[in-house]
Image (spheres, rainbow, N blue to C red):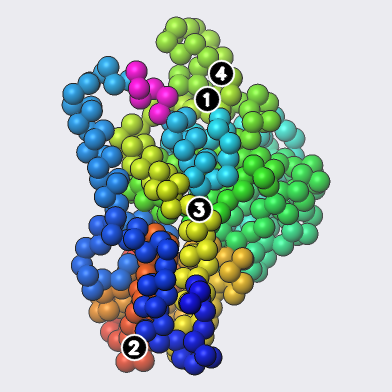
């Protein structure tokens, strides 16, 4: 029985989901994670991944190393951002060595790369109007600081960005910034086609990979990508606030200069010279001291991805989300839900958006009464994130089953409609 295969056109039973789990080549990875309460269904790995035993061991090891070696550890730690970046490039990003760094936060990395482009090139900045807020806020500030226009690209939030629309907006622009997978809907952009179209319009493109790195096969080098940023606490399971990553194609590295001139990007770092001169290569996009403890967990996540294989992970992500879409149609569509995610698995990442007019209360009721942890995104989306390394097909079936039963029984109506800061 293949991934996502229907059962004689009949109802999707839990037995079918269990059979898919039995046939799953990645099933063994689940036991390498902290699973906690056996009845709890965790479908929010697109916000924070589970703790893996590998990450726990890596963190314990680096803390022990700190205790034993003290400052002499820097002989090995000083280049950790680059080594971890290369591991991510090979395991998750489709990037050859020397083009990625694991460092800073996604926001800081976005600022560095976008700022470097605007310092080197004339033209406006383009970003989707519904893109993740930090991207829009950073770009708004940079555009104002550089005296550039900010073009907000409108489109259908449930569909991937249209190649022609992006190309038209890119005319006369310096930089286009796009999320490869939309944070709310899960819609996945065609990286290769859009990159080619933006280049033809004379601009560069910066990809936000927060909702795709570690969940789907990424082709940065093959697609001719220019720049990218992303986080490691979702599908890379490196922990809350773990270091982010950036990617700069080799052909751009000597042409761009980071606006944060930190000492870790200085050509002769320990000479402590009077003037700044950036090192050659990807290291010029470093800033301050690398977060050694956090990078240990990032490396553990990259190594597990490399072992499992990102192509296999992507296939399971497509199958898990297909099951969720089919169950939505069968169990939820008649309860006031609508699908907020593309139906074609090639057009989505590893999460699905279930839209409902009373989504906030439904989401809170799932957590408090059904022991299901999803998350909510304004105004009406409940997101089910389904990381392939530890999510079972039976988990998807059970989560939808509990959701349907809760709404059928009106349990969500007991919840306050007053929004909280976090789900």
Task: Please tell me whether mark 4 sits on a helix, a strand or a loop.
Answer: loop
Badge 2 density bin: few <14, some 14–19, many ≥20, Cα 10 Å? some
**Residue contact between numbered discs 2 and 3, judged by CB atoms under 8 Å:** no
At 52% across and 79% down in the image, what residue appears? Answer: 5
**Residue 348 location, x and y as percent?**
57, 65
Which residue sits at x=45%, y=21%?
264
Q: Which residue position is annotated with label 1? A: 283
Q: Kindly state the secondary structure of the residue where label 2 is placed.
A: helix
Dot 4: few (<14), some (14–19), or many (≥20) neighbours within 10 Å? many
Q: Residue at x 52, y 63 (%)?
A: 315
Looking at the rendering, the stretch of residues picked out in magenta corresponds to 75-80
Q: CA distance from mark 3 to mark 4?
A: 34 Å
Q: Earlier in the sequence, mark 3 or mark 4?
A: 4
Q: Earlier in the sequence, mark 2 or mark 3?
A: 3
Dot 1 or dot 2, earlier in sequence: 1
Residue of label 2: 405
């Amino acid at each position: 029985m293949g991934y996502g295969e229907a059962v004689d056109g009949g109802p999707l039973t839990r037995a079918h989901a269990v059979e898919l789990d039995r046939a799953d080549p990645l099933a063994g990875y689940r036991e390498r994670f902290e699973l906690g309460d056996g009845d709890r269904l965790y479908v929010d790995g697109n916000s924070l991944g589970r703790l893996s035993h590998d990450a726990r061991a890596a963190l314990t090891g680096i803390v022990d190393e700190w205790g034993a070696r003290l400052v002499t550890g820097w002989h090995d730690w000083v280049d950790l951002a680059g080594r971890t970046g290369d591991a991510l490039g090979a395991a998750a990003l489709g990037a050859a060595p020397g083009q990625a760094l694991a460092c800073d936060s996604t926001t800081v990395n976005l600022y560095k790369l976008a700022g470097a482009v605007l310092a080197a090139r004339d033209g406006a900045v383009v970003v989707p109007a519904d893109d993740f807020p930090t991207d829009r806020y950073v770009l708004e500030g940079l555009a104002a600081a550089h005296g550039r226009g900010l073009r907000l690209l409108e489109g259908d939030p449930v569909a991937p960005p249209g190649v022609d629309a992006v190309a038209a907006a890119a005319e006369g622009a310096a930089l286009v910034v796009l999320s490869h997978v939309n944070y709310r809907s899960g819609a996945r952009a065609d990286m290769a086609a859009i990159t080619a179209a933006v280049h033809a319009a004379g601009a560069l493109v910066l990809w936000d990979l927060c909702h795709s790195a570690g969940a789907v096969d990424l082709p940065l080098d093959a697609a001719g990508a220019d720049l990218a940023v992303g986080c490691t606490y979702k599908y890379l399971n490196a922990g809350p606030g773990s270091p982010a990553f950036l990617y700069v194609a080799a052909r751009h590295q000597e042409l761009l200069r980071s606006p944060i001139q930190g000492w870790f990007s200085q050509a002769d770092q320990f000479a402590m010279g009077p003037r700044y001169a950036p090192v050659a290569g990807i290291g010029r996009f470093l800033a301050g001291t690398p977060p050694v403890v956090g990078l240990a967990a990032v490396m553990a996540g990259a190594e597990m991805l490399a072992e499992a294989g990102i192509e296999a992970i992507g296939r399971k992500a497509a199958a898990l989300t297909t099951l969720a879409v089919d169950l939505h149609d069968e169990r939820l569509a008649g309860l006031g839900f609508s699908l907020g995610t593309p139906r074609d698995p090639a057009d989505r990442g590893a999460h699905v958006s279930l839209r409902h007019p009373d989504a906030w209360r439904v989401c809170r009721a799932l957590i408090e009464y059904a022991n299901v942890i999803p998350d909510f995104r304004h105004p009406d989306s409940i997101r089910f994130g389904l990381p392939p390394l530890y999510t079972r097909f039976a988990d998807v079936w059970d989560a939808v089953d509990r959701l349907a039963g809760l709404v059928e029984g009106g349990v969500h109506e007991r919840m306050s409609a007053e929004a909280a800061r976090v789900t």
